[in-house]
Image (cartoon, rainbow, N blue to C red):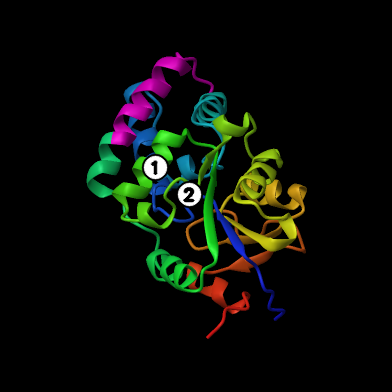
């Protein structure tokens, strides 16, 4: 195992720091049921790839050969997930302990997410993680670039004041991992809750849980 000294950790948010994907898929499953599409939760999760919600809805509709108003479905999807997050959203296992250790070691942290900034901030707040990031939240809407494009990762490093060589990036989806690889940053794939068990990139390290990251970082004792 090669340890590396880094100064900034870039985190994906949903499915990496907050356990949101299960709740999102429950909402998608219910919305589809209401328009006559019956899918298991596992079947819905196979299409939940970390992309835009409209794209995920389109993929599900195409896969089930159903025609529906995607714009209307997306609005209702956002309304229901926001309500569910307020009551049920939790941090991923090990997230708070890892973030606290990074904070104590004065390693900077930021978020790189395809979601709107307001949604990211609210999710972090609901999960009790907001204090670790303050204003260091970077959305695809800020960079006008969404994973798997690498520009959002470049945007994060630039705004944090670091070279990519000084950073590591953690994501749980193929889209996110691809963005990290294309950006040229050291990338970790969190396997804990993802459906993707092999990312296909030999240079990417796999993490079974967030606590495993400390094994790869040269943290002062």
Residue 78, magenta (yes or no): yes
- How many neighbours does mark 1 have within 10 angstroms: few (below 14), some (14-19), or many (20 or more)? many
In the figure, is residue 113 to the left or right of 2? left
- How many neighbours does mark 2 have within 10 angstroms: few (below 14), some (14-19), or many (20 or more)? many
Nearer-the-camera pick, 192 or 117: 117
Residue 211, given in percent of the width and then of the height, sits at 49, 73
> Which marked residue is nearer to the observer: mark 1 or mark 2?
1
Residue assigned mark 1: 121
| Quarter the N terminus occupies | bottom right
Residue assigned mark 2: 13
Report the span colored magenta.
65-82
Q: Residue sitting at 52 percent across and 86 percent down?
A: 221
In three-dimensional space, the C-alpha distance between marks 1 and 2, rounded to whole angstroms, equals 10 Å
Residue 184, given in percent of the width and then of the height, sits at 77, 53
Q: Is residue 181 above or below residue 41?
A: below
Residue 37, given in percent of the width and then of the height, sits at 41, 27
Does residue 157 appear in the picture of this structure?
yes
Q: Residue sitting at 54 percent across and 32 percent down?
A: 52
First-in-chain label (1 vs 2) = 2
């Amino acid at each position: 195992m090669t340890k590396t000294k880094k100064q900034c950790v870039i985190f994906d948010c949903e499915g990496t720091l907050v356990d949101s994907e299960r709740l999102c898929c429950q909402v998608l499953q219910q919305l589809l049921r209401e328009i006559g599409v019956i899918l298991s939760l596992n079947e819905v999760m196979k299409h939940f790839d970390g992309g835009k919600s409209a794209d995920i809805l389109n993929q599900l509709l195409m896969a089930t050969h159903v025609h529906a108003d995607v714009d209307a479905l997306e609005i209702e999807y956002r309304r229901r997930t926001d309500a569910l997050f307020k009551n049920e959203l939790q941090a991923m296992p090990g997230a708070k302990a890892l973030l606290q250790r990074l904070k104590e070691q004065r390693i900077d942290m930021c978020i790189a997410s395809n979601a709107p900034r307001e949604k990211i901030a609210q999710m972090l707040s609901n999960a009790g993680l907001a204090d670790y990031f303050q204003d260091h939240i970077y959305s695809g809407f800020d960079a006008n670039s969404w994973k798997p494009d690498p520009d959002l990762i470049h945007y994060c490093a630039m705004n944090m004041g670091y070279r990519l060589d000084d950073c590591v990036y953690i994501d749980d989806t193929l889209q996110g991992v691809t963005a990290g690889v294309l950006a040229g940053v050291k990338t970790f794939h969190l396997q804990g809750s993802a459906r993707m068990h092999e990312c296909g990139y030999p240079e990417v390290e796999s993490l079974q849980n967030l606590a495993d990251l400390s094994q790869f970082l040269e943290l002062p004792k």
